[in-house]
Amino acid sequence: MSSPGNDGETVAYSERLGVPLRWWVQGTMLVASLWLALVVAVPGVVPWIVTGAALALLAAGLTSYGSARIKVEDGVLYAGRAHIDTSLLGAVTALDADQTRRVAGMEADARAFLVLRPYLKRAVKVHLDDPADPTPYWLVSSRHPDRLAAALQALADH
């Protein structure tokens, strides 16, 4: 999935880890329940103001939490706010849900860099080959771990 990015850069993979629709629905229902409780108990415009503020906070929170991006572009892996040159990467493994749960839990290394989202059950484990970096690996959630692993592997093969 290689495509030209801004200014002629090559984007080998790009994904936004947005929250699922059900989180938006559940959050909206929570705010609606708040509105119902307030409109019965408090007269006037106050319930509408409080509900509007709660809805704005919900939207800001879900948008912010779901704004993390995973991108492989011009030989660099971006995961959330962090980035690393792909020349420093070692073995790349696409993990299924069970493997992800184990690597993020029982088999976890406290020094690992994690970009995990609870609503994404699969991930990619990327070992680092940088002697100056104490981080043994990155564990990155993905909706398409096979594609992300393939994009990273393609850069390693060059």
Image (cartoon, rainbow, N blue to C red):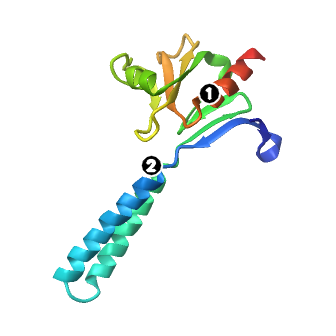
Q: Would you call the spot at circle 2 few (<14 residues within 10 Å), some (14-19), or many (20 or more)? A: few
Q: For the N terminus, which image quadrant?
A: top right
Amino acid type assigned to the residue bearing label 1 in the image: Asp
Q: Secondary structure at mark 2?
A: helix
Q: Quadrant of residue 12?
A: top right
Q: Is residue 28 left or right of residue 47?
A: right
Q: In this view of the protein, which residue sits in the foreground, 146 or 66?
A: 146
Q: Would you call the spot at circle 1 few (<14 residues within 10 Å), some (14-19), or many (20 or more)? A: some
Q: Is residue 126 above or below residue 77?
A: above
Q: In this view of the protein, which residue sits in the foreground, 25 or 134?
A: 25
Q: Is residue 127 above or below residue 54?
A: above
Q: Residue at x 38, y 68 (%)?
A: 55
Q: Quadrant of residue 88?
A: top right
Mark 1, residue position:
146
Q: Is residue 36 left or right of residue 117?
A: left
Mark 2, residue position:
65
Q: Is residue 50 left or right of residue 13?
A: left
The residues bearing labels 2 and 1 have C-alpha atoms spaced at a distance of 23 Å
Q: Nearer the viewer, mark 2 or mark 1?
A: 1
Among the two numbered marks 2 and 1 on one chain, the one whose residue lies closer to the N terminus: 2
Residue 138, horizontal then vertical, whole percent = 51, 24
Q: Residue at x 34, y 65 (%)?
A: 29
